[in-house]
Amino acid sequence: MTTKQEILAYAKQNGFIYPKFKVGFYFGLFGGIIGLMATTVILFIYALITNSSSLFSYINTNVISIISGTFQFVGGVVAFGIVFGCIPALLTGIYCAVFNFIIMKKLDYIHLYVVGTIFSAIYFNHWLNLPDEFWQRLYDLW
């Protein structure tokens, strides 16, 4: 079985350049989409559990409030999806691009998963340790 160095050396001889920008960009793009979907599901389930009666109360209101509520929900979900999905995935993509990460066996998937989990844990830890004034301003803004 060939090693990573042999693959990169052979590719360099034939004019192949590791696509660092594409790797980082696509990690961020797909991570944002996955984070967006996860955030949507979590927020929708939370809304169903906490106050299911107000979730369907838009039926008796006018069309403007339905459209406004929909755009507010979608805007919030997109913002949370970018913050909690795209940025940790982009950091993982930068890691892969800097170290020319190549998947050659099943263990490489586990390595990539562990690296992504570590980046996400560090990132979420920084969010959780923000001062209470930040969370109060965010709550007032929302």
Image: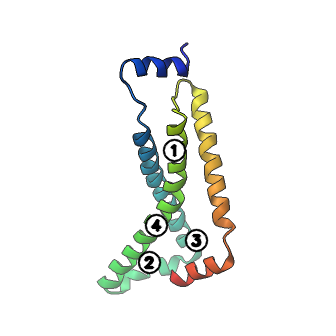
Q: Which residue: 40% across, 41% down?
A: 22
Q: Are marks 3 and 4 in contact (CB under 8 Å)?
A: no
Disc on the earlier residue, 3 or 4? 3
For the residue labelled by badge 2, is the local secondary structure a helix, a strand or a loop? loop
For the residue labelled by badge 4, is the local secondary structure a helix, a strand or a loop? helix
* Residue at the spot of label 4: 79
For the residue labelled by badge 3, is the local secondary structure a helix, a strand or a loop? helix
The image's mark for residue 49 is 3
Disc on the earlier residue, 3 or 2? 3
The span from disc 4 to disc 2 (Cα, nearest Å) is: 23 Å
Task: Locate residue 109 relative to residue 40 in the image: left or right.
Answer: right
User: For the residues carrying marks 3 and 4, which lies nearer the camera in this image?
Assistant: 4
The span from disc 3 to disc 2 (Cα, nearest Å) is: 13 Å
Please name the amino acid that badge 4 sits on: Ala
The span from disc 3 to disc 4 (Cα, nearest Å) is: 22 Å
The span from disc 2 to disc 1 (Cα, nearest Å) is: 43 Å
Disc on the earlier residue, 2 or 1? 2
User: For the residues carrying marks 1 and 3, which lies nearer the camera in this image?
Assistant: 1
